[in-house]
Amino acid sequence: MSWIIRNAETLNKNGKLSKVDIKLEGNKITDIGTGLKGDGFQEFDAKGMFVSPGFVDLHVHLREPGGEHKETIDTGTRAAAKGGFTTIAAMPNTRPVPDNVENLQALNQKIQDTAHIRVLPYAAITERQVGKVLNDFDGLKENGAFAFTDDGVGVQSAGMMYEAMKKASRIGSSIVAHCEDNTLIYGGAVHDGTFAKENNIAGIPSICEAVHISRDVLLAEAAGAHYHVCHISTKESVRVVRDAKKAGINVTAEVTPHHLLLCENDIPGQDTNFKMNPPLRSKEDQQALLEGLLDGTIDFIATDHAPHTAEEKSEGMELAPFGIVGLETAFPLLYTNFVEKGVFTLEQLVDWMTKKPSEVFHLPFGSLEVGKVADLTLIDLEGEKAINPEDFLSKGKNTPFTNWKCKGWPKATFFEGSLVWNEGGKQA
Ligand SMILES: NC(=O)N[C@@H](CC(=O)O)C(=O)O
Ligand SMILES: [Zn+2]
Ligand SMILES: [Zn+2]
């Protein structure tokens, strides 16, 4: 079906909003302008809605195969579309792990059959993600592996990481790293700081992450590889990435909305919806992450959407699994708490959720231009609504942001020219 989207508000070159019509034909944007003729087109009235390129989230746990009680490709991509996302990259800590061609092909088939938006599958770096045997990067890349990561766990051996980086570099792929040295976790469930002390819970120190990143930027330099840091969380990590970039090393980093919005002081008690890996760190760390994002040390935002069931999350702070959901709240939270307060601009936020991740991974998405794929999201920047996990399409209701009042709710999402999410949008 061909669409004409009428009177959407778009960001123009000087960062101001102005009205445009956008034509979508097949899977492409074919015209952008004012007063476009739309004979034979289905009309979508976007009056009062801001139009953004479809959001890109390169860190999502869809749980399928093996964790379908937490999320499926179907439910996770519906949640993503509702959150305004049109491209997501799926983490490989599933059962089985996409660590060989057969498993990856099976995953590709599931994605093709059940996903509502674009899903780029990560392949694992090592067999079963246990860090012992390097996977067949060539075969996996040929079968569509987006990049390589053992997310969920750090690659413990420097030698293994070096081999992985050399291999990735040779085939023009990237290493995406969960940075955690297992000898520095100390059985921690939260950050090794004031909350841990006050509640007598074992803490994960900041060095656990920063040590791994320090090691890896040197390995990346030696291997000539592109190395990307997942969910950066400490001020030391930001410093290491900043220095590595200055030294010309090909390192990039992502930060999550929750690490930008929360710190250990915000944990209201034994609420496991505030338990994630890496943990909410100190106020200083939170500030350093924002500074790192603003000065370009941190390249983009990713949610680390990590659904778990209420039952799993009810096991108490020490035993409950790490992780919180993020797809359906990322934009409204960041818009309301940073853009509306003047900390950064709408343009910056949109770039960190569209253009920047696309650029880092050479993806042809994340911009609204004639000839590009018609991935876009229409957002109500005015209407205010409180976050209610019961509204989520994700199976995971594990959010620390319940009852937070937000503006900036995505109302409709077009993926490859098709309307994949529409909340009361007016279709004339
Ligand atoms: N972030 C989390 O707290 N949990 C993730 C794993 C991960 O991202 O490391 C998960 O798979 O649940
Ligand atoms: Zn991780
Ligand atoms: Zn993750």
Image (cartoon, rainbow, N blue to C red):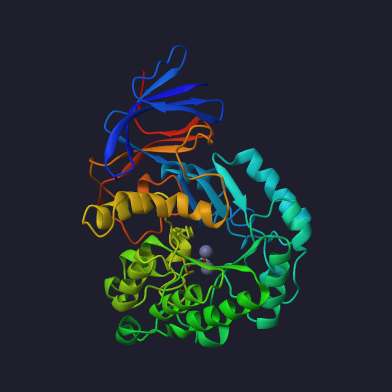
* Residue shown at the point (54%, 41%) measured from the top left: 117
Residue 135 shows up from this direction: yes
Q: Is residue 380 left or right of residue 106?
A: left
**What is the residue that sits farthest to the left in this orientation?**
341
Q: Residue at x 54, y 75 (%)?
A: 179
Query: In terms of depth relative to the viewer, which is nearer, 32 or 138?
Result: 32
| Residue 300: x %, y % from top left | 44, 59
The quadrant in which residue 271 appears is bottom left
Q: Residue at x 70, y 50 (%)?
A: 144
Which of the 4 image quadrants contains residue 285?
Answer: bottom left
Residue 50 in the image: state x and y as whole percent. Answer: 32, 38
Q: Is residue 17 left or right of residue 77?
A: left
Image coordinates for residue 343, horizontal then vertical, percent: 25, 60
The number of numbered badges drawn on the structure is 0
Give the quarter of the figure containing the C terminus.
top left
- Is there any visible trace of residue 70 in the rendered image? no
Which of 284 and 245 lies nearest the eye of the viewer? Answer: 245
Q: Residue at x 76, y 73 (%)?
A: 133
332 with respect to 315 (left or right):
left
Image x and y of residue 385, in percent: 25, 45
In the picture shown, does residue 419 fall above or below 183? above
